[in-house]
């Protein structure tokens, strides 16, 4: 119907996509074979069967296992290129792509292998797909501050290839404050800053992401709903939330998409956006997130336009990025 067509056709920016979460089971198996990496799954179907999650951690265990097939620069290129080709079909004009270097450097893969492969895919997407794509380096919050600093050090010679830093992985028990000094250093280096907060964790983690890390966007942030003062702060300062409806459904953050609070966040005047998070694991790319959450919560064309507008307002797109699609 017309609204669903509008949702699919409208130009949009995707601001919350973990590139390792775009690895489809078929590509995991192809790369495992190419690299001689053993997998504890007999087949693509066997692996897909394992995608039944009860919370964030149950997903992360499988997500990190899937990423173990990535060894060479070409692997990172192929993964990002496949995502960008898929994003083009969904009319994504601009993508800010998260990657988790510690997942790879811990296995002996060099930082430059990761960043150069991803960056080359972004450069080719610009010329061949008409999408501007940039990279956000995410620190794993279940690891130490020292490990985050070491990761930043390794990335230092490659900082012209990333637009910002983020914070992801297991949220509960890992409040943002642990990374205050790392994020302060990133700010001095001129990097943009975002953090996952309020996905499973409490509103207090959103406050500390804002005040201790000085982030410019909150990834997920759906738990803000439980704190009226926080809702007011987010609305007043127009701090964007990068919301991921299918992820929240699959990780049981909401019992059902019908209960998702995206509509309430928008109606409260927050700069919410719609994103896919880990599309290969959660059953859909960005347009699937739009169409399913709209169908479940009876949102309108006005919400659709607002979400498209918000996605560009919330982005870190430069003038050079905008020239790719404007
Ligand atoms: N939350 C935290 N860490 C992640 C996620 C997420 O939704 N996806 C990939 N890493
Ligand atoms: Zn995420």
Image (cartoon, helix red, strand yellow):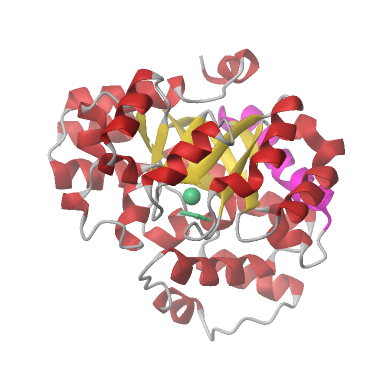
User: What secondary structure do most residues of the magenta stretch adopt?
Assistant: helix
Asked if the stretch drawn in magenta spans residue 120, the answer is yes
Q: Residue 315: x percent and y percent? A: 51, 25
Q: Residue at x 63, y 33 (%)?
A: 134
Q: Quadrant of the N terminus?
A: top left
Residue extending farthest left: 298
12 lies left or right of 161: left
260 lies left or right of 65: left
Q: Residue at x 36, y 59 (%)?
A: 283
Q: Is residue 271 visible?
A: no
Asked if the stretch drawn in magenta spans residue 303, the answer is no
Q: 32 or 269: nearer the eye?
A: 269
Q: Residue at x 33, y 44 (%)?
A: 222
**Figure check: 40 above or below 252:** below
User: What is the tally of numbered marks visible in this picture?
Assistant: 0
Q: Residue 289: x percent and y percent? A: 32, 46
Q: 172 or 37: nearer the eye?
A: 172
Q: Is residue 283 visible?
A: yes
Quadrant housing residue 204: top left
Q: Residue 179: x percent and y percent? A: 65, 45
Which residues are the magenta region? 110-132
Q: Residue 326: x percent and y percent? A: 51, 14
Q: Residue at x 50, y 39 (%)?
A: 208
Residue extending farthest right: 157
């Amino acid at each position: 119907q017309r609204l669903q067509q509008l949702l699919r056709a409208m130009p949009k920016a995707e601001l919350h996509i973990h590139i390792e979460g775009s690895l489809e089971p078929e590509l995991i198996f192809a790369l495992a074979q190419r690299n001689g990496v053993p997998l504890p799954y007999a087949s693509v179907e066997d692996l897909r069967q394992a995608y039944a999650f009860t919370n964030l951690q149950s997903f992360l265990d499988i997500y990190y296992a899937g990423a173990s097939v990535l060894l060479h620069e070409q692997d990172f290129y192929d993964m990002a290129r496949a995502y960008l080709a898929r994003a083009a079909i969904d009319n994504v004009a601009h993508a800010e792509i998260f990657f988790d270097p510690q997942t790879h450097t811990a296995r002996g893969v060099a930082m430059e292998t990761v960043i150069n492969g991803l960056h080359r895919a972004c450069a080719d997407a610009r010329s061949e797909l008409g999408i501007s794509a940039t990279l956000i380096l995410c620190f794993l919050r279940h690891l130490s501050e020292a490990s985050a600093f070491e990761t930043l050090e390794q990335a230092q010679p490659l900082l012209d290839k990333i637009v910002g830093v983020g914070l992801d992985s297991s949220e509960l028990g890992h409040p943002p404050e642990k990374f205050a000094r790392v994020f302060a250093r990133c700010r001095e280096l001129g990097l943009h800053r975002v953090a996952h907060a309020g996905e499973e964790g409490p509103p207090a983690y959103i406050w500390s992401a804002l005040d201790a890390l000085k982030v410019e966007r909150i990834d997920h942030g759906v738990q803000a709903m439980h704190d009226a003062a926080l809702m007011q702060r987010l609305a007043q300062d127009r701090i964007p939330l990068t919301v991921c409806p299918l992820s929240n459904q699959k990780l049981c953050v909401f019992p059902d998409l019908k209960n998702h609070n995206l509509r309430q966040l928008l109606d409260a005047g927050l700069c919410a956006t719609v994103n896919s998070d880990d599309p290969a694991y959660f059953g859909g790319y960005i347009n699937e997130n739009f169409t399913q959450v709209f169908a479940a919560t009876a949102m309108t064309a006005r919400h659709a336009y607002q979400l498209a507008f918000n996605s560009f307002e919330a982005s870190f797109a430069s003038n050079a990025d905008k020239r790719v699609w404007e």
